[in-house]
């Protein structure tokens, strides 16, 4: 089988071809186009496997070439240190390293998601981008009000200044010309984003997304009435079988702390950075709704909050919710509320199982 390493860029790609004996038999730099790349790969007979580093447009390359290959391997950019930390870096050398890593079996692979999952993910991530922009505008308006008004100067008939009456009050608020100009621009952007998000959701709701596991996920607290967050969870996970256990999904979601152990020293730090931030956000937002509905999760949240603080309690409960999502999707079953247990049993699952058997 031929091993092909590709250093893929926006306009050009560098190819390295290695035979089964580990000898480089071809090197080529091509201008990127569908016909050029397919014609070049088709010129080599026999089974071929291809590896490339994950970039923002890897899906375009995959959709163009997957039917010509025996297997396609996507490299995890954070784990390909041989390329990112190389002292001599150029396209030919990077393609050479990718080829040798793939041939030797030390190629750090990332998950290759199907096209429909990538499109749904892009759709939901763009909505998240719009929501973040709207939140930023709201914060700017609140800051402007704080620097111009005392709390007692604000109307007491409504709490949210972004309701209908609040927006009318903002438009008639007497301010200096400079501050008035800022507020008018911010309100215009806010209302434009509101219309964009509304149009986006009107497009999303009637879509018939055939997502496996959606019915079971709807039984988990925090996702019963949620639409977008449930879609985000399934679109970002795609295939639950790629995670060997619940802890690996929590790590991928960025809900576990970094750890450094050496000898008898053990240090736990902040949450891991190499994580899927969209998945983390959806789980944390769903946790805030879940602790209001599920007694077990609420009890666990209160215990951690008493011992530490509310931020740590939300993360710990989100991690627990992530474990529940894993088992629901993995076992294809509805959510079963966890029984209220003593703190000791909560820390020792074996004791919890024994107590359940005895009862």
Image (spheres, grey):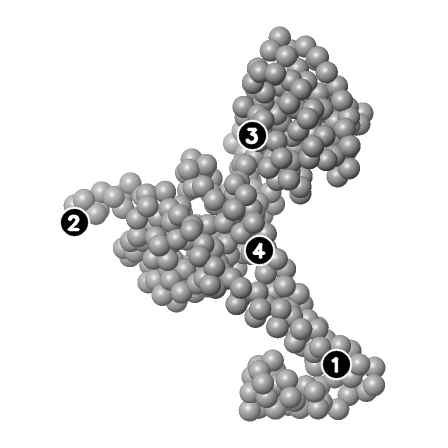
Note whether 335 is above or below 292 in the view shown.
Answer: above
Secondary structure of the residue carrying numbered label 4: helix
Secondary structure of the residue carrying numbered label 1: helix
Say which of 301 and 338 sits in front. 338
Say which of 315 and 194 sits in front. 194
The residue tagged 3 is: 67
Is label 2 or label 1 in front?
A: 1
Q: Earlier in the sequence, mark 1 or mark 3?
A: 3
Q: Quadrant of residue 291?
A: bottom left
Q: Which residue occupies the extreme right position in the image? A: 178
Instruction: Please say if the residues under marks 4 and 1 sit with CB atoms less than 8 Å apart.
Output: no
Q: Residue 123 has which mark?
A: 4
Callout 2 environment at 10 Å: few (<14), some (14 to 19), or many (20+)?
few
Q: Position of residue 305 (x, y in %)?
A: 45, 61
Q: Tell me if residue 256 can be seen.
A: no
Left of 95 or right of it: where is 330?
left
Instruction: Please say if the residues under marks 3 and 2 sit with CB atoms less than 8 Å apart.
Output: no
Q: Earlier in the sequence, mark 4 or mark 3?
A: 3
Q: Position of residue 150 (x, y in %)?
A: 69, 86
Is label 3 or label 2 in front?
A: 3
CA gap, disc 4 to disc 2?
49 Å
Q: Tell me if residue 187 can be seen.
A: yes
Q: Earlier in the sequence, mark 3 or mark 2?
A: 3
The residue tagged 1 is: 184
Q: Quadrant of the N terminus?
A: top right
The residue tagged 2 is: 359
């Amino acid at each position: 089988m031929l091993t092909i390493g590709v250093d893929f860029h926006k306009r050009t790609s560098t190819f390295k071809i290695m035979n089964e004996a580990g000898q480089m038999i071809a090197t080529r730099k091509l201008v990127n186009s569908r016909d050029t790349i397919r014609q070049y790969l088709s010129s080599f007979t026999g089974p071929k496997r291809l590896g490339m580093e994950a970039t923002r447009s890897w899906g375009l390359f995959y959709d163009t070439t997957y039917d010509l290959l025996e297997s396609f391997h996507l490299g995890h950019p954070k784990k390909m240190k041989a390329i990112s930390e190389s002292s001599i870096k150029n396209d030919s050398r990077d393609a050479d390293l990718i080829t040798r890593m793939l041939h030797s079996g030390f190629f750090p692979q990332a998950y290759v998601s199907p096209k429909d999952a990538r499109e749904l993910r892009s759709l939901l991530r763009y909505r998240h981008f719009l929501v973040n922009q709207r939140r930023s505008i709201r914060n700017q308006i609140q800051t402007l009000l704080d620097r111009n008004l005392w709390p007692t100067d604000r109307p007491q008939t409504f709490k949210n200044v972004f309701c209908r009456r609040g927006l009318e009050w903002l438009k008639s608020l007497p301010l200096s010309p400079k501050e008035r100009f800022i507020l008018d621009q911010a309100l215009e952007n806010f209302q434009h984003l509101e219309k964009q998000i509304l149009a986006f959701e009107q497009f999303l709701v009637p879509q018939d997304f055939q997502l496996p596991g959606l019915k079971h996920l709807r039984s988990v607290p925090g996702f019963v009435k949620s639409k977008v967050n449930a879609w985000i969870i399934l679109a970002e996970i795609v295939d639950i079988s790629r995670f060997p256990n619940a802890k690996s999904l929590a790590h991928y979601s960025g809900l576990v702390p970094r750890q450094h152990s050496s000898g008898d020293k053990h240090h736990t730090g902040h949450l891991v950075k190499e994580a899927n931030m969209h998945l983390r956000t959806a789980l944390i937002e769903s946790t805030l709704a879940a602790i209001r509905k599920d007694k077990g999760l609420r009890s666990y949240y209160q215990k951690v909050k008493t011992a530490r603080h509310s931020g740590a309690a939300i993360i710990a409960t989100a991690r627990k919710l992530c474990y529940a999502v894993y088992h629901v999707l993995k076992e294809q079953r509805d959510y079963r509320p966890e029984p209220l247990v003593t703190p000791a049993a909560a820390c020792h699952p074996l004791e919890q199982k024994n107590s359940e058997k005895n009862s």
